[in-house]
Image (cartoon, rainbow, N blue to C red):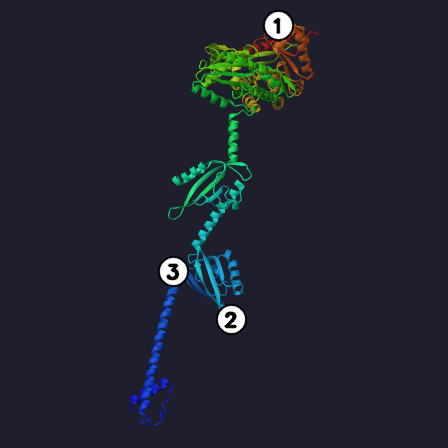
């Protein structure tokens, strides 16, 4: 047997796990042929078996690699990350497939193992969930939290895992799981939550309907607005109960054509109350552009509408009487003029209403106007025709008539109704009125002209006596034009300094010496000469120009007196009249302070004269203002005492220095009644520790009587007319010379 054959037999025997007998003996040659054949056959079989095993192993390995590849691709496609945590060693394996991978986690004993990269606000929650799973309280570990990425940003992840191996004591030793990047999903979720919170908390009611207008969702504001609970309206058809079905059809048609509808509606709450809302309907479309839902938004405008109605009422009605006001009147008048409709306009006010206000107070005056408007409105022929223009002025507008008989009959009836005695605040008042009447188109072509001419007619009616009516004519218009010219002339005179100050001396009745003077305004134009105060002062009072005229007089008087004092010619006081407009100025005291400061005149050289009617407009306010003036050292005098219906109760409260007796009482001193009246005024003044000045003294007899009645001071033409500044300067020099002469005469013992 050859060496090659021996080697083959030995290898085969080893493979088969047998040792042929005689192997270690010298019996190779004695080995029988059949044995050799058997060995070879077994060897071949063993080789074939090994080959098959190797092939199977290779196939299994291939399938395993394919499975791993599929798993890897699946994880890559899902964006998940695998992790494997060996709890005992703290080793954490992670296979990131994210576009922005997480920061690497070093091996540590931290708990959780990626503690350093979990957001601080999420760490405690994640640790608790992980510990609950390790303690066997949960079947799986699942948590959402923020992890730090390699670019130091935070991303939301869904972390899921499970313990897969346990130690001998039963505690988990290994745990595996996945991390899923849910940052975009979380942002979407937060956005949806934000929208949900907005929908829940928005003050407007929101209703979502399907394509058949069945309600599928409402927000809490809907229940607040309508009083209906959510469960009551779900799957109910959206309807507006106060409108016909056709109204909803119009809304649906508009939605289909335009995609939206908006408007204001009235609807009934569950308890029966009516509310108003702004309603907006819009389409909601799906991704294919098909209508999937409709959304309606209600904005509660009930309070706004109520405020608008109230503002409209206030804007169109008089706050005191409730009658239509001047704005509504002008609109109606303009409408009649524009449509060229014949109509008559009656404008009237109450005679001497100012005196009622001054003597009995504005509150009673308001009550009187209210009672009068209620009386007139109770008659059907005045209803919807009566307007309050302002103050005590009213208007009646009669459309589609120019019938003089009807108009005069109505005017007489109106005067009769006004003249009926009226009980107001425990006072019985009998009032009269004056009515001015104009006809369209004869007496004016526009609303302003008609109203202006009616006012003119009313003033002329008033001048003819109480309780009269008068139709407008051209002569009235001429007088109105003249008044307008005077107003313009006053404005020009203020600009060009045409107003001068004249001074009328005040003389001590006993000694005959000059003790002061009254400053009087004069309007002197270059072309027209002197304009009488009786002409321009009433116009200035009506227009308010009297305030600026008063400022001019005060400034010029203080300047002149300061100059005469510095020259040693005068040491008394100058009296300046304050108009009612000036006296009611809120900054009067400051204005006087400025004038005295600019002219450097000491305040004790200034006396302010205030009419009785002025202070009686509002006695408490007047007293307050007068106290402020007295505190500055300014003297105060009441002018025209006895003509303003003043109360003695108020008179003793006024901080006055002087009482002036009106010229009308001085002129009446030739009668016993007149003398007694002056005597009474003087006695009252002295009892109140006031000086008495008699104005308008023109006769020696008047002066003698005043001396007997112990009057203190007089002024009037008997002694001197009002003098210009230059003339009064000469007068002061004469007074100084007379005093010098008297001082030079030796006293007779």
Please provide percent x and percent y for residue 598: 54, 22
Name the quadrant containing residue 584: top right
Residue 746 visible in the displayed image:
no
Callout 1: 10 Å neighbours few (<14), some, many (20+)?
A: some
Q: What residue did someone put label 1 on?
A: 699
Q: Quadrant of the C terminus?
A: top right
Q: Which mark is drawn over residue 77?
A: 3
Question: Which numbered disc, 3 or 1, marks the residue that appears first in the sequence?
Answer: 3
Name the side, left or right, on which 158 lies relative to 698: left
Name the side, left or right, on which 196 lies relative to 509: left
Please provide percent x and percent y for residue 400: 47, 17
CA gap, disc 2 to disc 1? 138 Å
Name the quadrant containing residue 731: top right
Question: Which numbered disc, 2 or 3, marks the residue that appears first in the sequence?
Answer: 3
Q: What residue did someone put label 2 on?
A: 167
CA gap, disc 3 to disc 1? 126 Å
Q: Residue drawn at (38%, 67%), measured in percent from left and top? A: 67
Vertical position of residue 242 compared to residue 453: above or below: below
- Could you say which is closer to the camera, residue 701 or residue 12? 12
Please provide percent x and percent y for residue 213: 45, 43
């Amino acid at each position: 047997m050859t060496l090659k054959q021996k080697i083959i037999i030995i290898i085969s025997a080893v493979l088969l796990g047998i040792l042929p007998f005689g192997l270690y003996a010298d019996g190779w040659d004695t080995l029988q042929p059949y044995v050799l054949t058997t060995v070879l056959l077994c060897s071949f079989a063993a080789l074939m078996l090994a080959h098959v095993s190797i092939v199977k192993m290779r196939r299994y390995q291939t399938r395993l690699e394919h499975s791993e590849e599929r798993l890897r691709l699946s994880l890559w496609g899902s964006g998940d990350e695998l992790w494997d945590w060996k709890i005992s060693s703290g080793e954490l394996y992670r296979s990131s497939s994210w576009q922005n991978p997480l920061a690497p986690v070093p091996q540590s004993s931290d708990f959780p193992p990626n503690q350093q990269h979990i957001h601080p606000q999420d760490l405690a929650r994640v640790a608790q969930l992980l510990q609950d799973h390790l303690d066997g309280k949960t079947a799986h570990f699942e948590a959402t939290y923020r992890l730090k990425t390699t670019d130091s940003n935070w991303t939301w992840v869904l972390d899921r895992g499970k313990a897969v191996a346990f130690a001998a004591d039963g505690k988990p030793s290994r745990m595996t799981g996945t991390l899923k990047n849910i940052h975009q999903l979380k942002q979407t979720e937060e956005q949806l939550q934000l929208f949900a919170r907005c929908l829940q908390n928005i003050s407007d009611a929101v209703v979502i309907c399907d394509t058949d207008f069945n309600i599928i969702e409402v927000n809490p504001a809907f229940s607040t607005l309508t009083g209906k609970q959510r469960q009551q309206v779900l799957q109910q058809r959206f309807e507006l109960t106060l409108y016909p079905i056709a109204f909803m059809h119009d809304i649906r048609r508009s939605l289909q054509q335009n995609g939206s509808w908006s408007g204001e509606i009235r609807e009934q709450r569950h308890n029966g109350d009516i509310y108003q809302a702004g309603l907006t309907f819009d389409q909601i479309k799906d991704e294919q552009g098909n209508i999937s839902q409709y959304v309606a938004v209600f904005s509660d405008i009930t309070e706004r509408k109520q405020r608008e109605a109230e503002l409209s009422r206030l804007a169109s009605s008089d706050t005191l009487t409730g009658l239509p006001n001047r704005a509504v009147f002008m609109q109606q008048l303009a409408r009649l003029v524009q449509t060229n409709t014949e109509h008559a306009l009656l404008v009237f006010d109450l005679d001497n209403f100012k005196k009622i206000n001054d003597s009995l107070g504005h509150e009673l005056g308001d009550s009187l106007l209210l009672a009068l408007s209620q009386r007139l409105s109770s008659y059907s022929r005045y209803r919807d025709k009566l307007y309050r223009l302002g103050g005590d002025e009213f208007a009646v507008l009669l459309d589609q008539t120019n019938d003089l008989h009807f108009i005069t009959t109505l005017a007489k009836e109106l005067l009769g109704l006004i003249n009926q005695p009226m009980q107001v605040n425990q006072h019985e008042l009998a009032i009269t009125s004056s009515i001015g009447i104009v006809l369209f188109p004869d007496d004016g072509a526009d609303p302003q002209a008609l109203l202006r001419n009616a006012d003119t007619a009313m003033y002329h009616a008033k001048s003819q006596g109480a309780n009269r009516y008068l139709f407008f004519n051209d002569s009235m218009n001429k007088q109105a034009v003249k008044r307008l010219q005077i107003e313009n002339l006053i404005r020009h005179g203020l600009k060009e300094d045409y107003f001068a100050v004249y001074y009328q001396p005040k003389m001590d009745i006993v000694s005959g010496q000059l003790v002061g003077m009254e400053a009087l305004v004069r309007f002197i134009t270059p072309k027209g000469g002197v304009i009488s105060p009786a002409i321009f002062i009433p116009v200035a009072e009506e227009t308010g120009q009297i305030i600026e005229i008063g400022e001019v007089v005060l400034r010029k008087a203080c300047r002149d007196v300061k100059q005469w004092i510095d020259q040693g010619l005068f040491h008394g006081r100058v009296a300046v009249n304050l108009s009612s407009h000036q006296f009611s100025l809120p900054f009067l005291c400051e204005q006087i302070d400025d004038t005295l400061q600019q002219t450097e005149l000491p305040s004790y050289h200034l006396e302010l004269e205030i009419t009785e009617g002025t202070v009686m407009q509002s006695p408490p306010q007047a007293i307050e203002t007068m106290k402020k003036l007295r505190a500055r050292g300014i003297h105060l005098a009441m002018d025209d005492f006895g003509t303003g219906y003043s109360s003695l109760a108020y008179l003793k409260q006024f901080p006055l220095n002087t009482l002036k007796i009106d010229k009308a009482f001085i002129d009446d001193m030739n009668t016993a009644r007149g003398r007694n009246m002056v005597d009474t005024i003087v006695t009252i003044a002295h009892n109140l520790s006031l000086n008495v000045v008699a104005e308008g003294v023109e006769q020696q007899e008047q002066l003698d009587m005043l001396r007997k009645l112990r009057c203190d001071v007089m002024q009037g033409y008997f002694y001197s007319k009002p003098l210009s500044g230059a003339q009064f300067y000469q007068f002061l020099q004469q007074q100084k010379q007379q005093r010098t002469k008297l001082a030079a005469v030796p006293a007779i013992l």
